[in-house]
Image: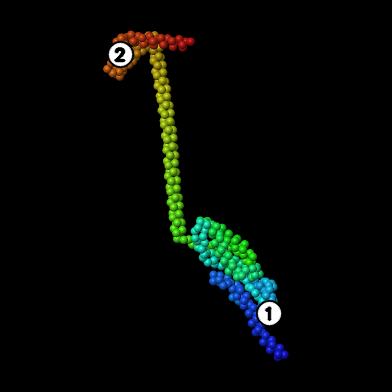
């Protein structure tokens, strides 16, 4: 009994030493030796196999039996066989954010850039992440860097600066296609900073200034053109209104002249009618009326020749019977009497 107890006591440290020596290479294998991705390593040491283990939430444990893959443990209680089974890999299933260090890239139009970013991913298959690639965290970071260089090389500088969203999508798709065999899902990638050479920045500032000057000149010319159009439209409307005013003035003047002519004609007709009535109603069977008409004709004759002599100048040609006013009055009366007889005959008919 004492011998069996001593043998049991003497074999315990050896078994633990053997388990530790077996677990140590796997612990080293799960370390990330890259200084840029040291925050991504799974764990500094693997848990000991004590037979009864509790797998934490959002962790995936890979179990090997006699050096061969046995199974993957889910969160919760797990029963293991000490000395036969070992915990080979421990992976976190949480989303991981890794900073991609600044790196140089050349665009399609041969402009050297320096970019950095942030990659978000998570492990969805612990078995593939354990046996599909060595140091998966380091591999995914390197894949993100090379993919970003490749995508930048396909774009010009202007498209790189303007299409960041499409650039991020293309990088995620390229990384996801390559990392699916490793059991890693690439969630998103964000280009954080883009550093340009000083000469390119100066050229961009000059371009922006030129564009602003161009827009200012265009706006100024547009303003001048619109002002000229407005002035022309105003002059056109002013001329139209002025012509309409002149037309209305002419119409009004013509209507006024016509109305004056009508009034003058009406007044003349009324005067002639009154004279005729007076002549017809004169005493002595119209003899007094004839004498009054003769007197008025003689006065008009004298006034007419007086006006001719005033306006004609120094030389006036007059008829031979100019001094015989009586004959002129007689002729005028005979014409008047003949007109009166004709008017009476027409009235009797």
Residue 140: percent from the left, percent from the top?
Answer: 59, 66
Q: Which mark is residue 317?
A: 2
Q: Could you say which quadrant of the image residue 143 lies in? A: bottom right
Question: In percent of the image, x 64 and y 78: which residue is there?
Answer: 22
Q: Earlier in the sequence, mark 2 or mark 1?
A: 1
Against 102, is 46 above or below? below
Quadrant occupied by the N terminus:
bottom right
Q: Residue furthest bottom?
A: 2
Question: In percent of the image, x 45 and y 59: which residue is there?
Answer: 199
Q: Is residue 99 left or right of residue 76?
A: left
Q: Which mark is residue 83?
A: 1
Residue 337: percent from the left, percent from the top?
Answer: 39, 10
Question: In percent of the image, x 56 and y 63: which residue is there?
Answer: 146
Residue 205: percent from the left, percent from the top?
Answer: 44, 56
Q: Residue furthest right?
A: 1
Secondary structure beneath label 2: loop
Foreground residue, 307 or 102?
102
Secondary structure beneath label 1: loop
Q: Could you say which quadrant of the image residue 198 lies in? A: bottom left
Q: Measure the C-alpha gap from mark 2 to mark 1.
A: 163 Å
């Amino acid at each position: 009994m004492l011998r069996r107890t001593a043998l049991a006591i003497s074999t315990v440290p050896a078994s633990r030493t053997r388990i530790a020596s077996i677990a140590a290479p796997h612990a080293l294998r799960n370390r990330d030796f890259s200084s840029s991705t040291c925050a991504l390593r799974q764990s500094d040491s693997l848990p000991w196999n004590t037979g009864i283990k509790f797998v934490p939430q959002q962790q995936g444990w890979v179990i090997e039996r006699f050096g061969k893959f046995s199974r993957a443990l889910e969160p919760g209680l797990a029963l293991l066989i000490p000395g036969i089974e070992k915990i080979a890999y421990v992976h976190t299933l949480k989303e991981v954010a890794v900073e991609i260090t600044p790196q140089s890239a050349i665009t399609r139009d041969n402009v050297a850039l320096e970019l950095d970013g942030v990659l978000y991913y998570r492990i969805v298959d612990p078995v593939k992440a354990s046996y599909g690639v060595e140091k998966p965290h380091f591999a995914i970071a390197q894949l993100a860097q090379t993919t970003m260089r490749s995508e930048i090389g396909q774009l010009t500088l202007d498209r790189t600066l303007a299409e960041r969203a499409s650039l991020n999508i293309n990088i995620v798709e390229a990384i996801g296609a390559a990392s699916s065999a490793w059991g890693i899902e690439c969630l998103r990638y964000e280009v954080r900073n883009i550093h340009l050479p000083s000469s390119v920045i100066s050229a961009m500032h000059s371009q922006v200034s030129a564009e602003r000057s161009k827009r200012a000149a265009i706006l100024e010319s547009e303003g001048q053109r619109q002002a000229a159009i407005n002035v022309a439209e105003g002059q056109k409307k002013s001329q139209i209104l002025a012509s309409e005013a002149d037309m209305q003035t002419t119409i009004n003047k013509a209507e006024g002249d016509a109305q004056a002519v009508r009034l003058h004609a009406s007044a003349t007709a009324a005067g002639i009618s009154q004279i005729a009535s007076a002549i017809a109603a004169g005493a002595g069977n119209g003899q007094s009326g004839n004498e009054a008409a003769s007197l008025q004709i003689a006065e008009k004759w004298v006034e007419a020749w007086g006006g001719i002599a005033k306006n004609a100048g120094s030389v006036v040609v007059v008829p031979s019977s100019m001094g015989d006013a009586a004959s002129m009055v007689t002729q005028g009366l005979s014409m008047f009497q003949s007109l009166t007889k004709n008017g009476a005959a027409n009235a009797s008919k």
